[in-house]
Image: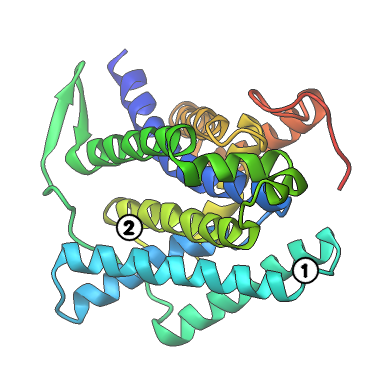
Amino acid sequence: MNEFLGFLLSGVTVGFIYALVGIGFTVIYNSSGIINFSQGEFVMAGGMSTVFLLKAGLPLGVSFILAIMVTSIIGIVLYKLISFSKESSQISLIILTLGFAIFLRGLAEVVFDKELHTMPSFVGDGSFDMFGTTLTYQSILIMIVSIVIVTFLYFFFKKTKTGQAMMAASINVDAARLMGINIKKILMINFALSAAIAAIGGVLLTPITSTNYEVGIMLGLKGFAAAIIGGLSNPFGAVAGGLVLGILESLIAGYISSEYKDAVAFVALLAILFFMPGGIFGNTKAQRV
């Protein structure tokens, strides 16, 4: 039982990171209809920027904030590129995000390097015993921060004018525009917000798993799988999708073999697309894109 709880808590920790990446996918998809395959690179940008700002001598807190700001600006740059190509088809715009991801990866390789990097934990290297299993303080921090972000997003979308404008735009862009909502501003905020959330995930994960210029590839794919599992039409479904995916990975790695861990996301993704195309909490109607 202690072994099972250890795998479970480990899966929840990683699952929250997948959830943060998946939320970014859903936020952009619901506002623009675009699947942003640069989302994983936002995770990488957050982690790598923080590491090298720390090496430049800046305090951890300052490095963290600056890394989020830099990544948000990168998200806005992507939005500007998409807005310049607004007459293009949806498929072309999705390909544009793939090209932007490749560009960011190459830029990170040049600006930073190819080595693996880590950084100190935000809360020290201690651990906490829970139900007979050990949980590091950094893992607890990831859970707490993820829950805070999800709670913030819930109240942001439900209680603030900007959040409600985002929800209106996601439901019907034309109707939202007729109501006086600045769609361009809303889309720019969505891209910046999704980039910032992904960056936070990248920074929190780096003390546990380390980071490099290629780390965004797999995290982006797993975040996408989490969004599909939860339902692309529901930002909060990505949380459930991320947790399901993280727990499955941890259990498979612990009880069978770690060699199959990365395959879990793709098997789960295919199963959901076959049997529940709308995801667990999304629309049940499938749409060909």
Please state which amino acid type lies under the numbered disc 1: Lys
Callout 1: SS: loop
For the point 58% across and 46% down, the residue is 27
Q: Quadrant of residue 231?
A: top right
Residue closer to the observer: 240 or 116: 240
Q: Position of residue 75 (x, y in %)?
A: 52, 66
- Above or below, 176 against 51 in this view is above
Q: Which residue is mark 1?
A: 86
Q: Are marks 2 and 1 in contact (CB under 8 Å)?
A: no
Q: Which residue is mark 2?
A: 203
- The reply, left or right, for residue 110 in relation to residue 1 is right
- The reply, left or right, for residue 56 in relation to residue 255 is left
Q: Position of residue 141 (x, y in %)?
A: 23, 40
Q: Which mark is residue 25?
A: none
Please state which amino acid type lies under the numbered disc 2: Val
Q: Report if residue 150 is visible in the image.
A: yes
Q: Position of residue 28 (x, y in %)?
A: 62, 51
- Above or below, 103 against 63 in this view is below
Q: CA distance from mark 2 to mark 1?
A: 32 Å
